Amino acid sequence: MADYKSKRGKVSYSVICDTHGYPWGTQEADFDLGDNTNTYPNPVSFEPIMAPRARKLAILGNHDIAQLLVESGLQIEKNDEAPVTMPDDKEWRRLQEYADHKHRVYVFGTDSAKTFHYYIIPKKQILEIAERLLTLEEDWDVIVLTHPPLYPIHENAGSCYKRWDRVDESLRNAENEPASNYFNSPRMLMRVLTAFQEKGKVELGGKVYDYSDKTSNNVIGCFCGHIHNSVKCAVSLSDYDGEEGSSNTKIYMQAFPTNGSNESIPENAHNPGMYIPDKCFISIDFDNKTVNGRSYVNPSDEWVIENIHHGKPLCDRAIGQYTFSQESNLVPKFYRGLCIGWTNGSNPLVIYGSNMHSTGGVLVKGLNKYVDFLRFSASGLLKYYVERGHTEQRIIPDFDTAKISFVSDHGVHWVFRGGRLVYVDRVKK
């Protein structure tokens, strides 16, 4: 579609999404697509939001929004029982923009979550994108980043379509909710991107945006996270409910898997179920006009869906705060001293304990107290304890530097320094 006059070569941008602050995820990338912080609206495991580790641009996910609501003193639930009402034009971080002048790629990072279970792109940001596209010079291409997917519903694609643009909270998830109410803001954004891709016009808010002079500009694609799976597709405006008969011009879209990884260590190896930290990429080939091997000028209708939610089942256990309890038969797993979750049974390569709880508590050196529970933060560091006979959870003093050691009931000697496991072995009898 575009007649490139000068741009050649390749460029690749690294992406992370949905690590949820857990230690096995990749910690740094060019673009952060949201939910890469210690965010979980739960009073037991609450920790302050962390600064995103994005070199170029970072957007917020729905977990990040939930944490911001908690920090703002607003009640938030991880369900639909107590929705938090926010103005539709609420901007958490405003529209973000990154310009790669060397490769002439312009990236938009949108606010795309309003509350934990309510997704919307503020109309103001869509109008800002439409306006900015008018000023792009020749050969500048466009990338759009959101947290939830922009593509409409597709079998097994995890589009979470009923979360977009709720018109009436009383109808959320109801079967009789009009389908045309879904995807109001994604549909508006698609009108803009389609007009830009077609070198045509679009009318929004009483203004006509004319892109007829953008003869060498293209939409590279729309990229997201949120669903913890890998999806590659291309959709048109006519694919959205209520837009039948509209343009059939396809826009490439891709959702990335959680933690920026699609690989896990085999179950019979050390630390089974652990992600191998690795980034995902937006890799563009300007000579062949492809992104991640798919054409962005005339993208294929094929949907490629890899349901790899959290990789292996054992990774699903590494969620929230971890605890060694007398009742539990789960064994903690560690990677580089960080607790990454649990597994059933012991690992043949390392001796782990199933709990560190006794009837009278465990004497913990460094605390010089008997404790009933020791718990890990969402970052995998040993950080909390509950003193014998108490219920209140406390932070280990100077946990990030302190040396903590104890012998659990079954004769395993544990030593942590700075919250990390540095030594574990059975006590010699």
Image (cartoon, helix red, strand yellow):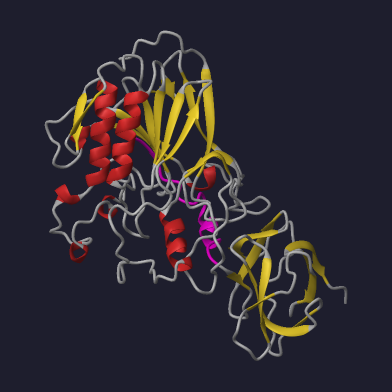
Region in magenta: 302-320
46 up-or-down from 58: above or below: below
Image x and y of residue 92, in percent: 41, 53
Q: Quadrant of residue 236?
A: top left
Question: Is residue 153 visible to the viewer in this orientation of the structure?
Answer: no
- The number of discs equals 0
Residue drawn at the location 53% of the way across and 20% of the way down:
102
Asked whether, in this view, residue 170 is left or right of residue 385, the answer is left
Pick the front one: 37 or 328: 37
Q: Quadrant of residue 37?
A: bottom right
Q: Position of residue 117 (x, y in %)?
A: 33, 59
Residue projecting furthest to the right? 429
Q: Decide if residue 421 is on the left or right side of residue 261.
A: right
Q: Residue 175's spot in the image, x, y percent?
A: 16, 59
Of 172 and 53, the residue lying toward us: 53
Q: Is residue 398 above or below residue 336?
A: below
Q: In this rendered view, identify the residue nearer to me: 135 or 211.
A: 135
Q: Give percent across and percent down for residue 40.
A: 49, 64
Residue at 41% across, 16% down: 139
Q: Quadrant of the N terminus?
A: top left
Q: Is residue 7 left or right of residue 90?
A: right
Observer able to see residue 389: yes
* Residue 359 counted in the magenta span: no
Residue pushed farthest top? 5
Who is closer to the viewer here, 336 or 223?
A: 223
Looking at the image, residue 117 sits to the left or right of residue 265; the answer is left
